[in-house]
Image: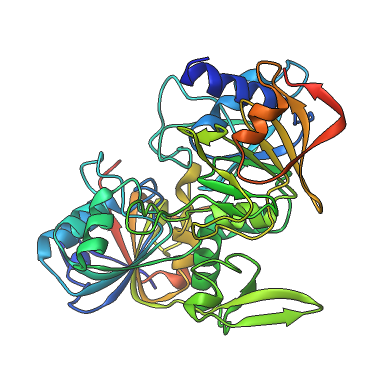
Amino acid sequence: MDKNEIKAFIAKRVAKEFHDGDVVNLGIGLPTMVPSFLPPDVKVILEAENGMVGAGAKPEVPDKCVSDAGGQPSSIAPGGAFIDSATSFGIIRGGHVDATVLGALQVDEKGNLANWIIPGKMVPGMGGAMDLVVGAPNVIVAMEHTQKGAHKILEACTLPLTAQTCVTKIITEMGVMEVTDKGLVVTEINPEFTQEQMQEATGCKLTFAADIKNME
Amino acid sequence: MAKQVSMQEAAALVKDGMTVMVGGFLSVGGANELLHAIAETGVKNLTLICNDGGQPALEHGVHEMIHNGQFKEMYATHIGINPEVGQMMNEGTMKVTLVPQGSMAEKIRAGGYGLGGVLTPTGIGTPVGEEAGKKLVEVNGKKFLLEEPLHADIAIIYGTQVDKYGNIRYHGTTRNFNVVMASAADTVVVQADEIVDMIDPDDVVVQGILVDYIVDGGAK
């Protein structure tokens, strides 16, 4: 798979996590591809932290007053509402957003997440990420399994954290991992890889579930 | 009661050394024409409280003032869209304090609503939590960080419609930080897309009693 195929494969699998009516906040990049893979009978309500619940599709005619969290033109879906920043983060922190999907620089076996800063290099700021991962009951990390072969899934994050023990699930092109008290449990594996290859690409001990399934 | 002033009169309200709150999210719902007028005055040594460093792809916005070096210090949640902020931060020409977005909204709300701060779980165990000197407070067995209030000398905010009483109505995603900032500064200036006689009280989002000056942004 090339890079775009890998991203689409991951996004397609993330889409299976959602139920009709779930309220979801999607991070930038790969996570924004998820809605296009939802089955027709599943509609999610997208929360955009800059100011709406019920974000819609990219509009044909942009309205300079309606944007997504990246500052790009967006629209509002039927049933949606515009909100201010304090309300938006009240909704997020208060647990009213069911799930958030975001990328990671590093994630570890305790569910600690690092995705906002590489000291001395990349300083984009945390934006809404710290509030989102603390508030949402389901925090799904969707990312490539390694950074050009370097481990991103570790025993303990070495980069500054976004939040402690917040990640509930990790979905990569190699498989699906749940964060449990006993570390990471692989519930699905991409049949293109062996368990040994997946373990090799991971910086902490993986437990393969007895009823492990193929990732599709 | 809120007073309507010209763009130049409004821009002159910002004086050297002030702490300035600027509404908008990546310049969407920003008082961008007024910010341009403030940039032209050459006012300096300001402290900025703003979600981000603006959206440099747009002609006007807070990014112009950042580019001019008019801020000595900035509080923001995300600076990735305006790389100049990161450069100035690394070169030490502008001190940048990063704040989680939800905490930023609450710090400003606390500043405007007479609270001594807010308790949030956001940021615990991160470089902007205990390590940054913030107090950990335990309530019913759960840990929270104490985020202290933010207050400004002046707030530069946006309104889609503003009436002559200073009441503000918003369209789209433009409410963002404008709403909390209206409560948290000594002087509040709103740039209106449109000035009308009276907004239906059911539709008022920011109450006119919080607004001091109105500027016509010239959109309509």
* Residue B203 locus on image (x, y percent): 57, 52
Dividing the picture into quarters, in which one does residue A214 lie? top right
Q: Residue at x 23, y 56 (%)?
A: B87
Q: Could you tell me residue B24's position as x and y percent?
A: 39, 53
Question: Which of B80 and A73 lies nearest the eye of the viewer?
Answer: B80
From the viewer's perspective, tell me whether residue A114 is left or right of residue B64. Answer: right
In the picture, measured across the screen, residue B101 lies left or right of residue B25, that is: right
Q: Quadrant of the C terminus of chain B?
A: top left
Q: Which residue is drawn at the image coordinates 69% and 29% (left, top)? A: A196
Total marks in image:
0
Please say whether residue B205 is visible from this viewpoint: no
- Where, by quadrant of the figure, is residue A197 drawn? top right
Quadrant location of the N terminus of chain B? bottom left
Q: Looking at the image, which residue is at 46% across and 37% down?
A: A66
The part of the image, by quadrant, that contains residue A67 is top left
Q: How is the image coloured?
A: rainbow
Of B142 and B126, the residue lying toward us: B126
Left or right: B63, with A32 as reference point: left
Decide: is A28 above or below A127. Answer: above
**Residue A143 in sight here:** yes
Query: Could you say where residue A137 lies in the image, as x and y percent from the top left?
Result: 75, 50
Q: Position of residue B177 (x, y in %)?
A: 46, 59
- Position above or below: B124 against A22: below
Q: Nearer the viewer, residue A88 or B98?
A: B98
